[in-house]
Image (spheres, rainbow, N blue to C red):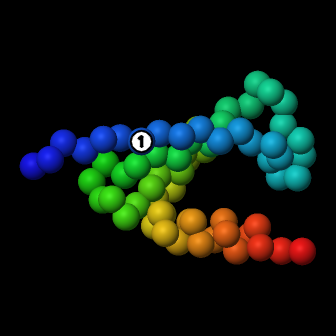
Amino acid sequence: MVPKVKSSNELKVYEHNGKEQQLTERPLKVTSHWNRDEFVIIDTGTETFTVLGDALRIAIDNAMNVE
């Protein structure tokens, strides 16, 4: 079995429930799934969500494609 490289990324949260965040707030973390390459894990600090990476990428592209 080929060893898997874990990827971890942090995203600064600018607003939470429509309110501007302070610099001390925790970032969102997006990490690779431990076993399945097609999934990513989104960690809010209190909850984790496993989603399809391609679906998340498409959702972000669609959300940014507005005028």
Kindly identify the residue that appears in the image at 9 percent across and 49 percent down. 1
Count up the numbered dots.
Answer: 1
Q: Is residue 27 left or right of residue 19?
A: left
Say whether residue 48 is visible.
no
Residue 36 on image: x %, y % = 30, 59
Kindly identify the residue that appears in the image at 84 percent across and 37 percent down. 21
Above or below residue 59? Residue 13 is above
Q: Is residue 5 left or right of residue 55?
A: left
Residue 57 on image: x %, y % = 57, 66
Q: Quadrant of residue 10?
A: top right
Q: Which residue is mark 1?
A: 7
Say whether residue 23 is visible.
yes
Above or below residue 52? Residue 11 is above
Kindly identify the residue that appears in the image at 80 percent across and 47 percent down. 16
Q: Residue furthest left?
A: 1
Above or below residue 56? Residue 45 is above
Q: Residue furthest top?
A: 24
Above or below residue 10? Residue 17 is below
* Quadrant (top left/top right/bottom left/bottom right) for the C terminus: bottom right
Is 51 or 3 nearer to us in this picture?
3
Residue 24 on image: x %, y % = 76, 25
Residue 55 on image: x %, y % = 53, 71
Tell me the SS state at disc 1.
loop
Q: Residues within 10 Å of mark 1 (few under 14, many from 20)?
A: few
Kindly identify the residue that appears in the image at 74 percent across and 70 percent down. 63
Amino acid type assigned to the residue bearing label 1 in the image: Ser
Q: Is residue 18 left or right of residue 55?
A: right
